[in-house]
Image (spheres, rainbow, N blue to C red):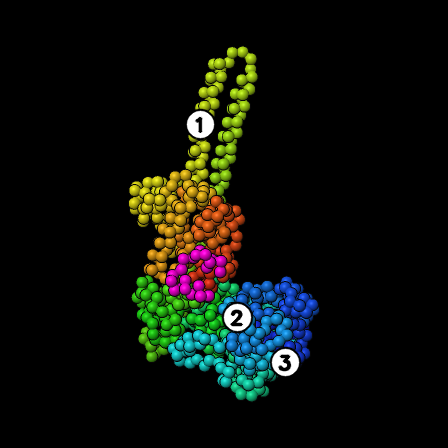
Amino acid sequence: MDVDPQTTTKEQAEEKKGIMVILVGAPGSGKSTFCQDVMKISSRPWVRVCQDTIGNGKAGTKVQCLANAATALKEGKDVFIDRCNLEREQRADFLKLGCSLGNVHAVVLDLPAKLCISRCAKRTGHEGNLQGGKAAMVVNRMLQKKELPKLTEGFSRITYCQNENEVQAAVNTYGSLSLLDSLPSGVFGQKNSESKVQLGIMKFLKKVDGPCSAANISQVSVGNKLHNENNIALHGPESGVASSGNAGAEVKDFEHAPSGNVVNEVTDCEHTLSGNSGNEVKDCDNVGEKVKDSEDIVMVPREDTCFSDDVPTLAFPSISTADFKFSIEKASDIIVDQVQLFLQKYHNVRLVLVDLSHSSKILSLVSSKASQKKIDTSKFFTFVGDITRLYSQGGLHCNVIANAANWRLKPGGGGVNAAIYSAAGEALETATKVRAGSLMPGKALVVPLPKTSPLFSTEGITHVIHVLGPNMNPMRPNCLGNDYTKGCRVLREAYSSLFEGFGSILADQNKLIHESNQEQVLETKDQSELNLMKQFSLTDQKGKRECVNEIEMSKKCKGPRKESESDNTELLNRDDDRSTKKRDESMSKAWGAWAQALYNIAMHPDKHKNDVIEILDDVVVLHDLYPKAEKHLLVVARAAGLDQLADVRPEHLHLLRSMHNVGLKWAEKFLTENESLVFRLGYHSAPSMRQLHLHVISQDFDSKHLKNKKHWHSFTSPFFLDSVDVMEELSKQGKVTLNNDERYLTKELRCHKCRSAHPNIPRLKTHISNCQSPFPAALLQNGRLVLPPNKLSASKSS
């Protein structure tokens, strides 16, 4: 077989990139043993980096581990990171290092906790001294924080091992790798607890591939067409061959394609491999390289694919090619044409064509034709998976999904339509009815997905776009027969409407971001005006001092000055009056007319009965006019002279306790109405409104009025002082320490639960609505959070 020398050189260069394998597992799961077993049989130069022994045989630091790993990768060696790595944060630095110097894999030793504890309890002389009776407590505590790795973190390959046989299979896989071998990317061996959902979509489809299992693995061999170096590969399902029983099933007569220039195409070489090793796929032209693996394959993207959550993404199925029997060849042309037109208008977006079957011909044709047109693979690619589980099962975050709907916009029928309605629940059907009762062929309907929908909460999907294509199936209503002139026109209109709908969603999001930026500009302007007012106030004081100096000088003059002194005294008095008046006006202006609203309500609540919801002797309660969460109240002190927390003295402790008790009462009232809420009570270190007030705010932060960094950080940074801490400090220290440094309000946006970073408020809000992480331990202490009774008991028990 003739191979282009340049291609071979490039391929070998890619193959020589080191592999960093990050082991993920509890103590006792066998991480160190795994490393040792691979290194015994492997011909590759492996280096084990273990924090328990990194310091000359003694425990060291994470920094030392990173330094040793970097040195090994630069020397062309492969690296095992032998740490527990159970939390995403613990893996992040190693991923960053590995991605810059090589390929990063994860091997998850997800063995039963009982087995791990048993091993720890029995062992002696352990490197980290974790042995004996204390093992159970440590293992259980660590497993409570377990976050399984995902491709979105930056891994190119994740292997799950859930019993000792699977661990041995993974040892064989890595141990048998030669210097020029590589492994396919994707997620392997995961026994997903939600597999019933995956099967649920299959029952709606006429022809699908059965799920892979350890006993019976169906795998499509995918033809990888070679292109020259100017062609761009499409990110699609990774070609690979898996066999049950023994690793090392070999695909023969394959040409080696350069990494990054492969287009996956399904040809007539689909085979099912099972049983013994040595099964061969033959008569396939230009199929990728030798693959070593014996594990289940789940949603396998290309090795160089890294899915970012920050890119607006539309996932869509092929329209009309299933039940409506539209020509796949013609449909693939239309899809590629319409995708190309859309991407000429929009840049920071991503389109994904999805099909459940690995043997999908439409994915193959679209991949090939998109490659021929050199469509940017970071903006359009194909994906094999359940469109309702792309994030939870494939690590692909999509904001919007398209539904191949029926004209009645009803659940049922079959295929994707039934699956999406089933996964989204009644919320989607109700939201759809509000907008339309039917749909014409060639049209699309954008439906914002209610937050009560499971697709919103678990997958992060914010919109569903219903789209209806032409029917070419005589067994279905409104069949066009064989009129492909009209059929192609209708299908082109359908995809055009679909992408226009996605564009309208993008426009709305961009408008929201623009409004947020504009508000930040206005706030900056307001701050500048405030600084200018302060300068004027200083100028007034300087003028007063000059006037006093002038009068003092006049007293030293010789001769009768009584009349003149009298005049100067009157002048000074008038200046004092004017200065006092200006100073008062300056204070008023510093707060601004709008900032006086709370003061006016607190002093005269009877005049504002439409605004307040409770009037007491020492406080009034009202809804925040611009709430930053679903529930946001203000408990305002009625005492004069208390503009802000800085004015509080020990004698005000009784008032603060009264304010706290009133806020707590309202929070508990709201919890009886909605147990999903969690509340926090506190004060701003430097409030924007005059008159001391306590915020009672739910922690969902689900509000259109939360628009910028300042809004977010004023409730989630140290700038926000918890009411219980304020009372405790005032009681013990006689004063309250304020965190009014403006730098708190300008830091990067991070989730208040899991601390993940996000580029803007819309992205942050979407994440918060899906975040399942617990609140930080510090917030769960000392009554800083007001929880419903069921969550309160759970937090105490943990």
Residue type highlighted by circle 3: Ser
Quadrant in the rendering for residue 25? bottom right
Res. 137 mark: 2
Q: CA distance from mark 1 to mark 2?
A: 72 Å
Say which of 237 and 734 sits in front.
Answer: 734
Q: Earlier in the sequence, mark 1 or mark 2?
A: 2
Tell me where the magenta segment starts and ends, as one range. 777-798
Q: Nearer the viewer, mark 1 or mark 2?
A: 2
* Residue 461 to residue 322: above or below: above
Quadrant in the rendering for residue 174? bottom right
* Residue 711 to residue 351: above or below: above
Residue type highlighted by circle 2: Met
Q: Residue at x 32, y 46 (%)?
A: 616
Please provide percent x and percent y for residue 188.
53, 76
Query: Dot 3: what SS?
Result: loop
Residue type highlighted by circle 1: Arg
Q: Residue at x 44, y 36 (%)?
A: 587
Q: Earlier in the sequence, mark 3 or mark 1?
A: 3
Is mark 2 in CB contact (under 8 Å) with mark 3? no
Res. 249 mark: none
Residue 17 visible at all: no
Q: Which residue is mark 3?
A: 176
Query: Dot 1: what SS?
Result: helix
Is mark 3 in CB contact (under 8 Å) with mark 1? no
* Residue 455 to residue 249: above or below: above
Q: Nearer the viewer, mark 3 or mark 1?
A: 1
Q: Which residue is mark 1?
A: 578
Classify 10 Å Cα crowding around label 2: few (below 14), some (14-19), many (20 and above).
few
Query: Dot 2: what SS?
Result: helix
Q: Residue at x 43, y 30 (%)?
A: 581
